[in-house]
Amino acid sequence: MAVTRTNIILKTAEDWPKFDRAFQTKAVSYDLWDHIKEDSPKALLVEPEMPEPESFKAPPPEAGPAQSTRASAPASATPPASTGLNADESRNFQIAWNIYTVKEKAYSTQRANIRSLTDWVLEAVAQRYVDSSYAPTESLHEWYKKLKEHAGIRKGLDKKIARDKYQQAVTPLKKPPKDWNTWLDTWEEAISTGLQKDLFEAKDSSV
């Protein structure tokens, strides 16, 4: 039995302005908007390499450079045992470990935020837009760009839609609405959008 989602925000192109505001608010709160925005997005963090004690040992005079294999793993406040390192080598390893733990924490936090934002979008977007825009292997920047192309509205039309909704909201009621709470939410959204779109009639109360 298919699960019916009741919290979909983006159902049609007319919903794009509302969804876009909510999406950007979420992305900013997760420190991800600078990595998603259309103009010059920043690169996401790269998973850091965990330093190995063996790589800090000075090679014997007659031997070539020491070879080591570095594995990535969740950082711990306590580094691996550094038995066999002298004082200078241990100090250098500890410095490298401290840098690694800071980078690994930042990377893990970003990955968790990406998962949270992705889950929210998959719940808030109609399935047809998910099918046409979402590719798990693509970056958030590419996903947002495709979603805007498929679900967004062309430049200028969003202002017309905002004006129509504003005019509808300020038109005197001929009879009381069935649900005052729903009507009030719609009215507040229309006024807010009108101000955001810089509508003259929304800024001048005499109009």
Image (cartoon, grey):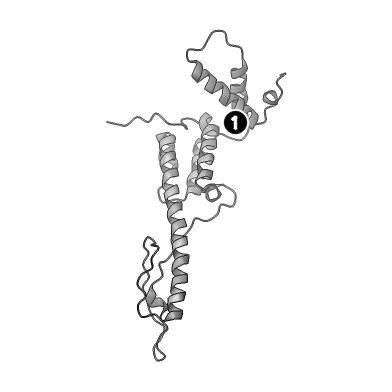
Q: Which x, y percent locates residue 54?
A: 37, 77
- Amino acid type shown at disc 1: Asp
In this view, the residue in front, 139 or 7, is: 7
Question: Percent x, y for residue 165?
Answer: 58, 22
Q: Secondary structure at mark 1?
A: helix
Q: Quadrant of the C terminus?
A: top right
- Determine whether, in the image, residue 67 is placed left or right of residue 163: left
- Residue located beneath label 1 in the image: 158
Q: Extreme top residue here? A: 175
Q: Residue at x 63, y 24 (%)?
A: 163
**51 in relation to 111, above or below:** below
Judging depth in this view, the residue of 48 and 122 nearest the camera is 48
User: x, y (%) of residue 186?
Assistant: 54, 22
**Is 192 located above or below residue 93 in the figure?**
above
What residue lies at 41% left-to-right and 47% top-to-bottom?
Answer: 115
Instruction: Name the quarter where the N terminus is drawn.
Output: top left
Instruction: Indicate left or right for 12 with 193 as reference.
Output: left
Where residue 85 sits: x, y (%)? 39, 80
* Residue lying furthest bottom: 62
The picture quadrant where one finds residue 118 is: top left
Q: Is residue 33 above or below residue 102?
A: above
Q: Residues within 10 Å of mark 1 (few under 14, many from 20)?
A: some
Q: Residue at x 44, y 60 (%)?
A: 104
Is 80 situated left or right of 189 in this image? left
